[in-house]
Image (cartoon, rainbow, N blue to C red):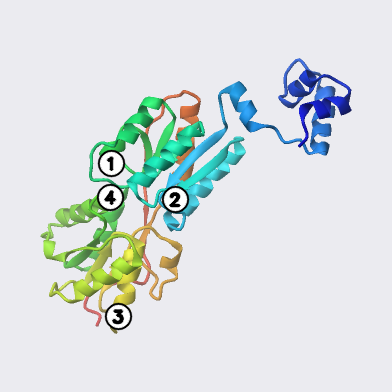
Amino acid sequence: MVRLKDIAYRAGCSVMTVSKALRDAKDISVATKARIQHMAEEMGYVPDAAAAGLRTRSTRLLGLIIPTLTNPIFARMVMAIEEWVYQHGYAVLLMHSHNDPTREEQCIRRLMSRRVDGLFISPASRMESNAKIYEELQASGVPTVMLGSRAKFCAGFLCVESDDTTASASVTRHLLDLGHRRIAFFAGPQISPWAHDRFAGYKKALREAKVEFDDRLIFQAGSTIEEGEKAAVQFLGESTDATAIQAVNDMIAIGAGTLLLKQGLKIPQGYSLAGFGNVLVSEHFRVPLTTVRQPKFRLGVAAMELMLAKLRGEKAESKRLPAELVIRQSTAAPGRK
């Protein structure tokens, strides 16, 4: 490994001069800086980030905790954050919680032990209104931005999220405008704030249209394709007279749609079907899926802006971004069998 004294020996100057040149200090001439920096690059010098962190009390590291990168919702958000981190000379330490509160706590502690300058967290769902690790995190003063949650246990932190309630209501309103009055809702995990918001949007649109809410049209699904298939089996086994299905996310919608098609039922002639999220596969499903396009990349950019403000010691406010209804071939007027 090339050391500062190796560069100093070759450049014929002191270690202090080399150190200042590499740190772009003002009391070193431009010509000397350029000569030493070029020499360091030629020799393959790599700065010791840990040593620099001891001097500056900044590790230039940011922690990022998400449930899993295989979830398509996070892919573009992480891309946006990583791009900003790169542009500003930071590095990202990415960890997965698998939506497990215990694992998430361990991830937070490990990142804090690395003295990260800030944390991005998509919090694991909990029934409890308080979480000790988040109380500790707030007391630590580490700049923290939540990705998509307003749960009580982390309500004291800045967050970025999409306006899921309004977006979900727009899906229900679209189905109502097509003439559907019996709209089944495949709901998400009961402890997830986003699932509550999307269910609230569904009920809001029904209420505004003066369509009576019927709990027999509500099916607990979850969040995966497999859970969507199971919910569809239950749906078909009950007499609901529903003509449309609104799913809490695209994975549930795709699972439900796959099961319906396997049973010989047609979409949208038999049942209209809508999801939420606009994951890549939704557009390429056998019947392209009506859904909600979440501003995934813009959410990442908004999170970056909040983090930058926090790192600068500036005041900042949480952000909620609008999401857009995308109408495709999976929804149509009822009675087309």
Identify which amino acid the numbered label 4 is placed on: Ser
The CA span between labels 2 and 4 is 18 Å
Residue 94's place in the image compared with 307, above or below, is: below
Q: Compare marks 3 and 4 and give the one earlier in the sequence.
A: 4
Decide which of 268, 135 is in the foreground and name it.
Answer: 135
Residue behind mark 3: 266
Question: Can you give x and y, in whole percent of width and height, for residue 70 in the image?
Answer: 45, 58
Query: Which quadrant of the figure has residue 240?
Result: bottom left
Is 54 displayed left or right of 200 in the figure? right
Number of residues whose C-alpha sits closer than 10 Å to that of mark 2, classed few (under 14), some (14–19) or many (20 or more): many
Viewer-side label of 1, 2: 1
Q: Compare marks 1 and 2 and give the one earlier in the sequence.
A: 1
The CA span between labels 1 and 4 is 8 Å
Q: Compare marks 2 and 4 and give the one earlier in the sequence.
A: 4
Question: Can you give x and y, in whole percent of width and height, for residue 71 in the image?
Answer: 42, 57
Is 321 displayed left or right of 269 in the figure? right
Viewer-side label of 3, 4: 4
Identify which amino acid the numbered label 3 is placed on: Lys
Question: Can you give x and y, in whole percent of width and height, for residue 122 in the image?
Answer: 39, 45
Residue behind mark 1: 151
Identify which amino acid the numbered label 2 is placed on: Lys
Residue behind mark 2: 296
Q: Secondary structure at mark 4?
A: loop
Q: Compare marks 1 and 4 and give the one earlier in the sequence.
A: 1
Residue behind mark 4: 192
Which residue lies at the image location 31% right of the left edge and 50% below the top edge? 164
Number of residues whose C-alpha sits closer than 10 Å to that of mark 4, classed few (under 14), some (14–19) or many (20 or more): some
Marks 2 and 4 in Cβ contact (< 8 Å): no
Residue 100's place in the image compared with 171, above or below, is: above
* Residue 13 appearing in the image: yes
